[in-house]
Image (cartoon, rainbow, N blue to C red):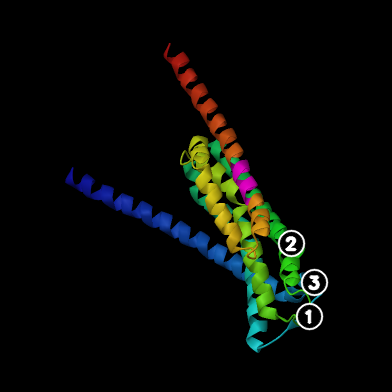
């Protein structure tokens, strides 16, 4: 008996080591793909940079050589994040797959392309907000009084300050659906905390937009809409989960009779 008791901790320890080894392997593969997409971003950095410059009619000034390096690395890093994101989600799914049911595997697998698409759509929407609303507003503040001079670093920093938050917040529906399916969140909780959610989103809108009340509201409105869509999707997932639980209980009662 004592030998059996000693063997149980060893088996558990071996199980943990196997899980850590698998996790390490998947993280290494993810890092490999990150480096691969980072190199791809470096290769196409000129095309991406020109895309960001085509929609503006202002002259950018270069103050120091470090700005060029910062822009190149930031663009490559953003490409690497966007490209690696679906692969990272796939690795996470493969890691937790043995603990999921067949139905949960199919449902969670469908989240992976949605995560990538929402990230790209969020960045595109943020860029549209920047080009069509924020940048024209900032330029209008000058009113021809001063000579406008944009540095390269400040311009691109301004772009990423707007686009990346939108890319992250566009993932909110997927995150809410996933947490609802796990039972961590419920539609009732999201509805009860709606006013706090609005407050946080308005604060975020003020952080990523110029100090103009109307423009801050315009930026916050899409975030609020995303929050409401997340609540609706949470209700859908929660209702499906309750229906499956009810069917399961009815089947057990039928078998018991």
Task: Read off the residue under disc 3.
Answer: 56
Q: Gap in Å between the C-alphas at discs 1 and 2? A: 19 Å
Query: Is residue 218 placed above or below 69 in the rendered structure?
Result: above
Is residue 106 something one can see in this rendering?
A: no
Earlier-in-chain disc, 1 versus 2: 1
Q: In which quarter of the image is residue 50?
A: bottom right
The total number of labels drawn is 3
The overriding secondary structure of the stretch rendered in magenta is helix
Q: Is mark 3 on a helix, strand or loop?
A: loop
Residue of label 2: 133
Q: In the rendered structure, find residue 59 and report the number of the disc placed on it.
A: 1
Query: Which element type, helix, strand or loop, lies under badge 1?
Result: loop
3D distance between C-alphas at marks 3 and 1: 9 Å
Report how far apart the C-alphas of labels 2 and 3 lie in the structure: 12 Å
Name above or below for residue 255 compared with residue 187. above
* Nearest to viewer (mark 2 / mark 3): 2
Confirm whether the magenta stretch covers residue 224: yes
Which residues fall within the magenta stretch? 223-230
């Amino acid at each position: 008996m004592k030998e059996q008791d000693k063997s149980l901790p060893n088996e558990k320890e071996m199980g943990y080591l196997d899980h850590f080894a698998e996790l390490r392997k998947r993280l290494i593969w993810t890092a490999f793909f990150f480096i691969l997409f980072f190199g791809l971003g470096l290769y196409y950095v000129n095309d991406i940079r020109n895309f960001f410059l085509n929609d503006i009619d202002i002259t950018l000034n270069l103050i120091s050589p470090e700005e060029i390096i910062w822009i190149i690395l930031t663009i490559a890093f953003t490409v690497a994040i966007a490209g690696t994101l679906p692969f990272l989600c796939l690795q996470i799914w493969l890691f937790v797959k043995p603990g999921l049911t067949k139905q949960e595997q199919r449902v969670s697998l469908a989240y992976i392309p949605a995560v990538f698409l929402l990230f790209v759509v969020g960045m595109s929407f943020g860029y549209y907000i920047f080009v069509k609303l924020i940048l024209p507003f900032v330029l209008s503040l000058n009113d021809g009084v001063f000579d406008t001079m944009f540095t390269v670093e400040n311009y691109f920093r301004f772009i990423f300050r707007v686009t990346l938050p939108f890319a992250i917040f566009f993932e909110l529906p997927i995150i809410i659906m996933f947490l609802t399916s796990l039972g961590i969140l419920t539609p009732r909780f999201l509805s009860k905390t709606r006013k706090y959610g609005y407050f946080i989103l308005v604060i975020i809108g003020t952080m990523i937009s110029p100090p103009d009340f109307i423009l801050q509201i315009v930026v916050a409105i899409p975030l609020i809409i995303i929050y409401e869509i997340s609540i609706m999707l949470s209700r859908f997932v929660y209702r499906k989960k309750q229906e499956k639980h009810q069917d399961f209980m009815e089947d057990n009662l039928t078998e018991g009779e």
